[in-house]
Image: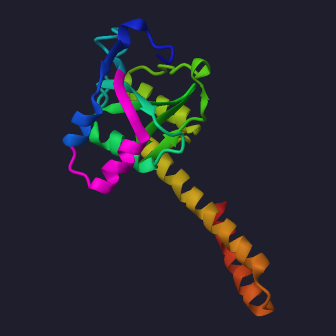
Amino acid sequence: MLGLPTQTEIHKALPKTVFTQTMEIKPSVKAVFDEDVSRMAIENVIANKTIPTLKEGETVKSIYVLGVQLKRKDYSDHSIVLLAKRIPQNIVLALQYGEETQLVVYREILFRSIWQKTGEVSNLLLKGNDLDEVWENIIQTIGSFKVEEGNTLNEQINQNEERRKLEEKIDALQKKVYAEKQPRRKMELYEQLAELKKQLK
């Protein structure tokens, strides 16, 4: 799967019933999970034992690829976050719906690739000197971002998330400015907008 070496393949089914029974979750959350997920299987294990030339990292000892068959394409983020949080591994989720696949990783927030035809999904590149670096590169590739010089991965993620939220505020305020009819109030909103745009730089 995903162009990984054949020695990483294990194709081990992960029964959904066992998974949901071991979780203490609200019935409503479980119902949504059941509506989203059809079946799951651990497809690959990326580790020193399966790829001897790949060294263990200080924190990352292995990376798992979990294939998830979906019942619907417009799945709930909560279902995927639930999966990622409840499986105590560094995990790439290969979400499959029909003939399409989307790659997802969770690190504070969900990062996801675009949906692609399953046979055309880009290979998961194992780039790095050890599994720590490989894992960070996988997150950046799926999330389509780069860690700027001087930042850690977590710092970059936090900065990107703060910027995204600020851009949402600016967009919402711009709409208010255009819709406002009273000149005085319009000017107040415009000043607030200018201040937010300064923060964006």
Image height of 3 relative to 199, above or below: above
144 relative position to 129: left or right: right
- Magenta stretch encompasses residue 147: no
- The x, y position of residue 164, in whole percent, is 58, 56
- The x, y position of residue 30, in whole percent, is 31, 49
- The x, y position of residue 79, in whole percent, is 39, 45
Q: Quadrant of residue 87?
A: top left
- The x, y position of residue 55, in whole percent, is 33, 17
Magenta-colored span:
23-42
- Residue 81 showing in the rendered view: no
Image height of 37 relative to 117, above or below: below
184 relative position to 28: left or right: right
* Residue depicted at 39% across the width and 33% down the height: 38
50 relative position to 148: left or right: left
Question: From the image, which quarter does the C terminus lie in?
Answer: bottom right
Q: Nearer the viewer, residue 53 or 66?
A: 66
* Residue depicted at 46% across the width and 48% down the height: 76
Image height of 154 relative to 100, above or below: below
* Residue depicted at 76% across the width and 84% down the height: 180
Image height of 80 relative to 101, above or below: below
- Magenta stretch encompasses residue 38: yes
Q: Nearer the viewer, residue 14 or 111?
A: 14
- Residue 6 showing in the rendered view: yes
* Residue depicted at 56% across the width and 35% down the height: 113
Q: Quadrant of residue 50?
A: top left
